Image (spheres, rainbow, N blue to C red):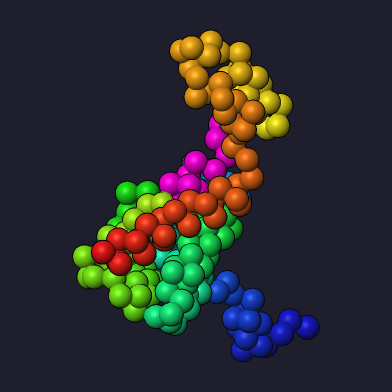
Amino acid sequence: MPPPPWQRRLRETGTRRAPLDRERIVETALAILDRDGLNGLSMRKIADELETGPASLYWHVGSKDELLDLVFDHVIGELHLPDPDPDRWAEQLKDVARAMRDGIARHRDIVRVSMGRFPVGPNALRFTERVLAILRAGGLSDDLAVSGSYLLTVVVNGFMLEEAPGEGPQPDADFLRAVSEYFASLPGDRFPNLVAVAGTFTLGDADERFELLVDLFVDGLAARART
């Protein structure tokens, strides 16, 4: 016997897809970005993943560019920032830089999404507010705090953009050894410094280079603040 109509409707309602909303669109876009990269992200692909049409997406987001703003803000919302401690502001700022690096590393091409954007979403505003609070708690002037907050993003994003896998061959130990040998073979009278450092001219460990970069940046801010 077929089920009564009211039971059939209840069963169908129970198996309906979740309603389309902005949060689902953003989460789906981020999942595709992680899997396929920025070049593989399209409104059509997002719609296919959600089993709908691209036109349905535009009821919730005005454009792909607006969607990328929302995706970027979502990633910023994953970052945990400490409460300001005046006695530890410099180390806290370094922790923020490390958290930013980890957040970027978790999501493929998100650093490319961030380039050229001025994030003003709710998560971005909370992030900037907290970074400014840390810097001002450390005694930095308002001008220096604003510049430091902005340049922190430039420093971390620049490092991660350089570290992101490119289309061509990536440097490895053999390549770096060849670079060192090439520099060592240069005429010393014309390139005395390159020849002198040839044995250590390698990219080295990424973590060590990042820590050095962050130390130089934060220590420079601290020195400027003291003056």
Tell me which residue sits at (49%, 41%) in the image: 162
Per the rendered image, the range of residues in magenta is 157-170
Q: Residue 195 occupies which quadrant of the picture? A: top right
- Residue 160 % position (x, y): 50, 48
Residue 29 sits above or below residue 92 on the image: above
Judge whether 184 appears above or below 105 on screen: above
Task: Name the foreground residue: 175 vs 123.
Answer: 175
The image shows residue 184, relative to residue 2, as above or below, that is above
| Numbered circles on residues, count | 0
Instruction: Identify which residue, 226 or 115, lies in the foreground.
Output: 226
Task: Locate the C terminus and report the quarter of the image it occupies.
Answer: bottom left
**Position in image of residue 188 (x %, y %):** 53, 14
Residue located at (52% from left, 23% from top): 194
Spot the residue most to the left.
Answer: 143
Q: Is residue 116 magenta?
A: no
Classify the position of the N terminus by image quarter.
Answer: bottom right
Residue appearing at x 50%, y 74% in the figure: 80
For the residue pair 31 and 61, the one nearer the viewer reads as: 31
Q: Position of residue 11 (x, y in %)?
A: 66, 82
Q: Position of residue 182 (x, y in %)?
A: 61, 17
| Picture quadrant of residue 133 | bottom left
Residue at left offset 59%, top offset 37%: 203
Q: Quadrant of residue 48?
A: bottom right
In depth, the one of 141 and 70 nearer the eye is: 141
Visible residue check, residue 106: yes
Query: Quick check: can you spot residue 77?
Result: no
Question: Left or right: where does residue 13 sit relative to residue 134?
Answer: right
Above or below: residue 114 compared with residue 5: above
